[in-house]
Amino acid sequence: MVRRTKEEAEATRLQLLDAAEHCFRDKGVASTTLDDIARSAGHTRGAVYWHFENKADIFEAVCERVHTPMQAMLNDLAADPGDDPLGYLRNDAIRVLRMLTDCDRVQSVFEIKFCKLDGGPDFDRLRRRELETNTRCLSMLQVVFEAAVRVGQLPATLPARETAEAMHAFINGLMRSWVERRDFDLRKTAPWLVDTFLTGLKNSPAPEDCCN
């Protein structure tokens, strides 16, 4: 009986998260109320408070169901860049972009993050967490680019930290542009886009040459 109760509670929680994702995507985070989520899930407001502290807590749980693509691709690569770090990074970057186009849940969460996150002061914790996630991604990208320089895939003068910033902005910018407009074929052009960026790095001048 206890096991069944736990299973029912988890089923209710998942229903609430599905409903919240739908409401956030449809109405925006600020315009969605806890009553909206409860009604959409077919439960009471009390059920919402049983599982979640507030709307920010629900939003955080919705986002946690989707691993941050950039972070997911970098965890293993930064731990072991291997003998072809740039090649692995290329393949992972393409996979990340195609993950966005191919998975409705990833699309939904990033549409909410990019276009519908207007949540107010309760979301300060989430903004801090997002900043921490971005900082970790930048650190891992820096490790990969340093490895690419060591094996001779990139110029020795390449500044790894600034290159990591550029790559992170490049991938996130493509994702945001596609989510907001969807007026280009990101899935088809992902290899060309990534190759164009990486080819530019291979042929980049020394930083001091750009500043003179």
Image: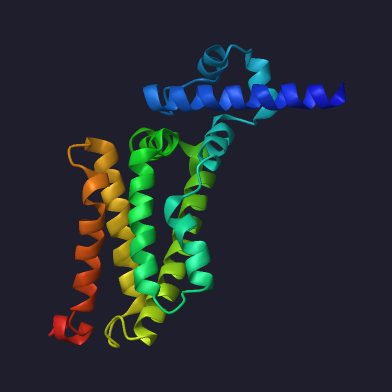
Above or below for 179 versus 163 = above
Instruction: Give the side of residue 66 with respect to residue 7, left or right.
Output: left
Q: How many numbered marks have been drawn onto this rendered protein structure? A: 0
Residue located 31% across and 72% down the image: 163
Query: What is the x, y in percent for residue 181?
Result: 22, 36
Above or below for 35 versus 177 = above
Quadrant into which the N terminus falls: top right
Above or below for 170 versus 98 = below
Residue located 23% across and 64% down the image: 195
Query: What is the x, y in percent for residue 103?
Result: 41, 37
Q: Toward which corner of the image does residue 107 lie, by quadrant?
A: top left
Q: Toward which corner of the image does residue 115 lie, by quadrant?
A: top left
Instruction: Give the side of residue 192 with respect to residue 7, left or right.
Output: left
Q: Is residue 118 visible?
A: no
Query: What is the x, y in percent for residue 185?
Result: 21, 42
| Camera-side residue of 3 and 19 | 3
Residue located 55% across and 42% down the image: 64
Query: What is the x, y in percent for residue 82?
Result: 46, 77
Residue located 46% across and 55% down the image: 131
Q: Is residue 115 visible?
A: yes
Quadrant into which the C terminus falls: bottom left
Q: Which residue of the protein is positioned furthest toward the right in this rendering?
A: 1
